[in-house]
Image (cartoon, helix red, strand yellow):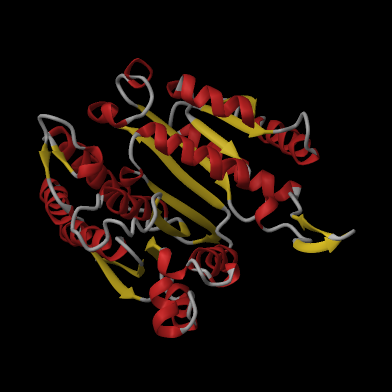
């Protein structure tokens, strides 16, 4: 029996509720696929600030370091918005985790199920039949991490400075992730830049073009980020794998998620430099946030968290069959007409968090 150690960081808001359903589904997977998943829970985010005095306690970091993967919930909420920016849960927990573990590659699917096209805010004619796009975002470079970074006074007024820095090697490694992902999909990579304005964009386009030569079976196209934002709304089915640097990927992946219909359906994986015998160490989390307005009401959609667990099985643990089983179970439950409030429509059965989790577990 294969054994893996999983760090479970449920976090704040709806995090603990949806994490419980992911754990429920994983317990079924353990039995069916002869796995042993040893879960160790740790505090992160706002709850960690309240109990431990900091968003990412040393004990939590230790638990993550000893694990084969991190299953993450969500952090933050109004309670902690008054803290200094560098002490707020999102900035003081997620960014340090990405830096500490070198989580350079963010994989974020935008999957619009054929039976959930009504939830998309764009015209039915555009999303009819659904679509499946994967955003591969560089996660540890660019404006978010470049130095110098400051707010200072010059000539009697405040001036903010953020520095956008990319090294060729950073672009090369994320490009390889995108092209390899495309080889297992529809073999199209759309690389996003602003090469008509930014020197970063010139280097990005030049480097991605060179890497593409190593993948002759994959077609490469380039788009400026502003055009890409328009084309994603105009024809999301025209995209397969979207490759983008940190800032552009952050914005476009949110746009893709909204076009897909509901953040409550979409998982993500942040993969690191550390390779193991089964895959890459990573952090796996829903694309949505803590949703404090519905926390504790038992109505949150757990599917994003459940599908994040499937991504963990696939990319970190090398258990593709188990991941396939979870993803197929989600499709079956949707086909059966079960819906949480965020994806509900007339003629479907409205269910809560626990009932949705139970249904997915039963469908495996």
Q: Position of residue 255 (x, y in %)?
A: 48, 36
User: What residue appears at the point 24 percent right and 47 percent down from the top-left corner?
Assistant: 326
Residue at the limit of the structure toward the front, as seen here: 156
Position of 99 with respect to 210 (left or right) is: left
Regarding residue 67, the answer to whether it shows in the image is yes
Residue 44 makes an appearance in the image: no
**Residue 337, image x, y percentages:** 12, 35
Q: Is residue 259 left or right of residue 322?
A: right
Instruction: Establish if 131 lies above or below 44.
Output: above
Q: Is residue 326 above or below residue 192?
A: below
Q: Residue at x 10, y 50 (%)?
A: 362
- Which residue is rendered at x = 47% and y = 46% of the image? 107
Q: Return the residue nearer the eye: 315 or 229.
A: 229
Which residue shows up at 60% across the image and 70% down it?
Answer: 86
Q: 214 or 116, which is in the foreground?
A: 116
Please give left or right for residue 341 compared with residue 167 in the image.
left
Residue situated in front as seen by the camera: 162 or 249: 162
Q: Position of residue 132 (x, y in %)?
A: 39, 31
Q: Quadrant of residue 243?
A: top right
Quarter of the image that includes the N terminus: bottom left
Residue lying farthest to the right in this orientation: 155
């Amino acid at each position: 029996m294969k054994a893996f150690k999983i760090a479970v960081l449920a976090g704040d808001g709806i995090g603990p509720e949806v994490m419980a359903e992911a754990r429920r589904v994983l317990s079924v997977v353990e039995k069916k696929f002869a796995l042993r998943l040893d879960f160790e829970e740790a505090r992160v985010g706002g709850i960690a600030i309240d109990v431990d005095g900091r968003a990412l306690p040393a004990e939590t970091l230790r638990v993550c370091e000893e694990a084969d993967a991190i299953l993450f919930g969500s952090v933050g909420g109004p309670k902690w918005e008054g803290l200094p920016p560098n002490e707020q849960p999102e900035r003081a927990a997620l960014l340090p985790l990405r830096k500490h573990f070198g989580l350079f590659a963010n994989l974020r699917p935008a999957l619009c199920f054929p039976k959930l096209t009504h939830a998309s805010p764009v015209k039915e004619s555009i999303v009819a039949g659904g679509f499946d796009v994967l955003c591969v975002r560089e996660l540890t470079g660019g404006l978010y991490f470049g130095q110098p970074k400051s707010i200072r006074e010059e000539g009697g007024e405040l001036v903010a400075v953020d520095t956008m820095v990319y090294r060729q090697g950073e672009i090369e490694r994320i490009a390889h992730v995108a092209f390899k992902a495309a080889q297992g999909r529809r073999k199209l990579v759309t690389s996003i830049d602003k090469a008509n304005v930014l020197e970063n964009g010139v280097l990005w386009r030049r480097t991605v073009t060179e890497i593409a030569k190593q993948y002759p079976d994959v077609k490469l196209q380039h788009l400026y980020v502003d055009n890409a934002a328009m084309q994603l709304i105009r024809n999301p089915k025209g995209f397969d794998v979207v490759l983008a640097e940190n800032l552009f990927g952050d914005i476009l992946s949110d746009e893709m998620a909204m076009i897909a219909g509901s953040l409550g359906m979409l998982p993500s994986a942040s993969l690191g430099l550390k390779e193991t015998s089964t895959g890459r160490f990573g952090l796996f989390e829903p694309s949505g946030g803590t949703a404090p307005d519905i926390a504790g009401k038992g109505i949150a959609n757990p599917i994003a968290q459940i599908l994040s667990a499937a991504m963990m099985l696939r990319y970190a643990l090398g258990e593709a069959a188990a991941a396939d089983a979870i993803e197929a179970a989600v499709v079956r439950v949707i086909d059966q007409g079960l819906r949480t409030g965020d994806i509900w429509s007339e003629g479907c059965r409205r269910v809560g968090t626990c009932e949705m989790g139970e249904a997915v577990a039963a469908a495996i």
